Amino acid sequence: MSKENKIPYKIYLEESEMPKQWYNLRADMKNKPAPLLNPGTLQPMTAEELGGVFCEELVQQELDNDNAYIDIPQEIRDFYKMYRPSPLVRAYCLEEKLGTPAKIYYKFEGNNTSGSHKLNSAIAQAYYAKKQGLKGVTTETGAGQWGTALSMACSYLELDCKVYMVKVSYEQKPFRREVMRVYGASVTPSPSDTTQIGRKILAEHPGTTGSLGCAISEAVEVAVSNPGYRYVLGSVLNQVLLHQSVIGLETKAALDKYNITPDIIIGCAGGGSNLGGLIAPFMGEKLRGEKDYRIIAVEPASCPSFTRGKFAYDFADTGMVCPLAKMYTLGADFIPSANHAGGLRYHGMSPVLSQLYADGYMEATTAIQTDVFEAAETFARVEGILPAPESSHAIKVAIDEAMKCKETGEEKTIVFGLTGTGYFDMVAYEKFHDGEMNDYIPTDEELAEYAAKLPKVE
């Protein structure tokens, strides 16, 4: 491989170049995300109402549509320094393997024990809970990255941590579950018989493999019924996208160092946290009319909320106790097939990203499971990192776009988010190698059945 190119394999920022503020994308949106609604009154949730579920400071961040930049507390910045800044990597070996003129970069967020980007928001939410004097927090987790990250953050700050893990992932990923327990968290497969909502879901859907919507319901019930606890969420909400903006801010700073302007930015999309974080400063430039980028969200074909869902108010959880959010949704009681898309198996999408998608600022596409794992192996064999199944959705489309450049001869610059590693996802890789992986995609009839149950909100 030629060494004449001056762009290094890995672009690192200095500690002094790390972001000191999070970027609030909503401040630059002309059409703001619709407000969260009280499930009882269908009126916009007030700060006081949200404060019964979430930490006080996080409520303020959740409702902030005006301040573009919010200071990152020094304590959080000090914690970030343990694993940040994360590298922006030029995928020279992948480019050579594909024979493409495209220039491919990926922002690698798996260089911490949680194995993913989730720690960026986990430490922030745990910090504000500790600052408020709380005893502990509750949460849900899909593939386990968020639960692992939160257990690490809570251990660091000496907070109790109760995790409800989607049952299919609890069974598929026992080692990630054990990492959470190493850090002192209690981990319960969801739906469970430990909550009223869990028992109700089990009665209505015997043998269900669970969903993020189920786990959210259980975690919220436990939080509101135990004094000194609050619920925290690993994706979807405005506050989470705010904290994850460190990903995009670092990415842009690294690219700017070498005067690189991306043409295409790609991220996997489940609830929206990593995608929203990666694209934040680039989308800000697009909203302000300063630059233009092609931004692509990639979701599993088995859980296609962007591409086949409805843009409507819906419950954020299966138990229908959380606020209603206006988002692209498949329906709160939609339970995806027991596949290996992990953290992308959520029925809805971030209200921020949903509004941007509805307004035409970004694209969305789907990938089927076996194609995703084929792309993951192509990447692993040349770039030396075993990617998480979630991240591999972005890899699949990045490869597709690079191959289009090969056909046309265009030298486009592609940036994608490598959100985490797949070393705890070996059951999924085993199923792929043994030919036992299915590519189930819900039918139009199935989705129409769920869509018909959406709340009637004017």
Image: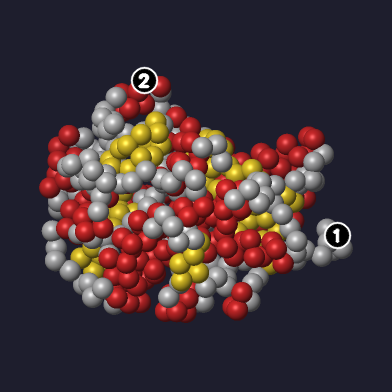
Q: Amino acid at mark 1?
A: Ser
The residue lying at 21 percent from left, 35 percent from top is 205
Residue positioned 26% across, 58% down in the render = 47
Tell me what residue is drawn at x 33 percent, y 46 percent.
35
Q: Gap between marks 1 and 2, in whole Å?
A: 53 Å
Can see residue 380? Answer: no
- Can residue 419 be seen in this snapshot? yes
Along the line of sight, the residue nearer the viewer: 188 or 245: 245
In this picture, is 27 found above or below 348? below
Expressed as whole percent of the image width and height from the top left, the position of residue 386 reads 56, 56
Q: Which mark is residue 2?
A: 1
Q: Dot 2, how many residues are within 10 Å of its Cα: few (below 14), some (14-19), or many (20+)?
A: few
* Mark closer to the observer (1, 2): 2
Residue 242 in the figure: left or right of residue 402: left
Q: Residue 132 vs residue 283: left or right? A: left
Q: Looking at the rendering, in which quadrant would you find the N terminus?
A: bottom right
Residue situated furthest top in the rendering: 445
In x, y percent, where is residue 243? 45, 62
**Looking at the image, residue 130 lies above or below residue 64:** below
Residue 137: percent from left, percent from top: 25, 65
Q: Secondary structure at mark 1?
A: loop
Disc on the earlier residue, 1 or 2? 1
- The kind of residue tagged 2 is Glu
- Left or right: residue 47 versus residue 113 is left
Q: Residues within 10 Å of mark 1 (few under 14, many from 20)?
A: few
Looking at the image, is 426 positioned above or below residue 455?
below
In terms of image quadrants, where is residue 260? bottom right
Q: Where does label 2 land, which residue?
A: 445
In the image, is residue 289 above or below residue 11?
above
Q: Nearer the viewer, residue 456 or 9?
A: 456
Name the foreground residue: 204 vs 323.
323
Task: Identify the residue at image location x=54%, y=61%.
Answer: 247
